[in-house]
Amino acid sequence: MATSKFLSADTRILYIKIEGVFIPVACLTDNSFTEGVDSLDTTTIENAGWTSSIPTNQSYSISFSGLQIYTLFPPEADQTKASYDRLKALKRGRAIFDWEIRTNDLVFIDYGKGYIDSLSESAPVGEFLTFDGSIKGVGEPLFTSDLIGSVTWDSTEVTFDNTIITWDNDAI
C-alpha cells in the first residue's frame, strides 16, 4: 500500500515571463491557484421541476503575496526577480504574459497566460513593505509533469506523450 506524501508549499513558486525569460515573483509568502466554472440553470421533465445546471465558461486566477525588494530601479535592483515595482509596471501596461507555477525540482508545472487584475501595497509602520496581487487567466491553464509525461486535454481529446485519445461526449 502506498503511503501519503505531503507536499511543502515552499516548493511551488510562481514565475512570470518578462523579456523572454521566466523569473520568480520575489519573496513570495503565499501563492494560490483557483479555478471556477459558471453554470446555466436548467430543468427538465425528468427532474420534476427541480433545478439542475450545466457547466459553461471556466475561469481561473492566481493570487500571490510577498515582501518587497527592488527589482526595477538600479543600482539596488535584483533584476532576476519580479517584485512590486515590476509587477506594477506590468499591471499599468495591461500586459498579457506567460506564467508558470513550478516545483523546485521541475516535476510539476502549471502554466498559461494572464494579466494582473489587482495589485496592492501595504506599508505598516516599523515592518517590511508587502504586496498582494492577482493574475486573471487568459485561455486554458495547462499542466505537465515529468512523472506522467506530457499531457494536455480539452473536452473531447487527451494527448499523452504525442498519443491522441479521443472520445464522444454524446456516448456517455
Image: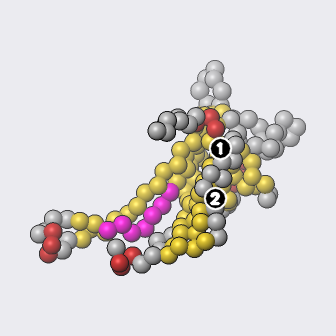
Single out the mark in the foreground, 1 or 2.
2
Residue 59 is a magenta residue: yes
Question: Residue 143 versus residue 51: which sits nearer the camera?
Answer: 143
Task: Find the residue positioned furthest to the top.
Answer: 126
The spot of residue 14 in percent (x, y) is 64, 46
Q: Residue at x 64, y 70 (%)?
A: 162
Which residue is tagged 1?
103
In terms of sequence position, does the residue under pointer 1 or pointer 2 come before the other?
A: 1
Which residue is tagged 2?
149
Task: Find the residue positioned furthest to the front.
Answer: 1
Task: Find the residue positioned furthest to the right.
Answer: 75
Q: Residue at x 68, y 35 (%)?
A: 27
Quadrant of the rendered structure where residue 17 is?
Answer: bottom right
Magenta: main secondary structure equals strand
Q: Is residue 116 visible?
A: no
Inspect the image, locate mark 2, and give the three-letter code of the amino acid beneath it. Gly
Question: Residue 48 versus residue 121: which sits nearer the camera?
Answer: 48
Residue 140 is a magenta residue: no
Q: Residue at x 65, y 44 (%)?
A: 103
**Mark 1, secondary structure of its residue:** strand
**Vertical placement of 159 versus 31: above or below?**
below
**Mark 2, secondary structure of its residue:** loop
The spot of residue 55 in percent (x, y) is 36, 66
Q: Residues within 10 Å of mark 2 (few under 14, many from 20)?
A: few
Inspect the image, locate mark 1, and give the three-letter code of the amino acid beneath it. Thr
157 horizontally vs 129: left or right: left
Span shown in magenta: 54-60
Distance in Å between CA atoms under marks 1 and 2: 16 Å
Q: Is residue 14 visible?
A: yes
**Vertical placement of 144 versus 105: above or below?**
below
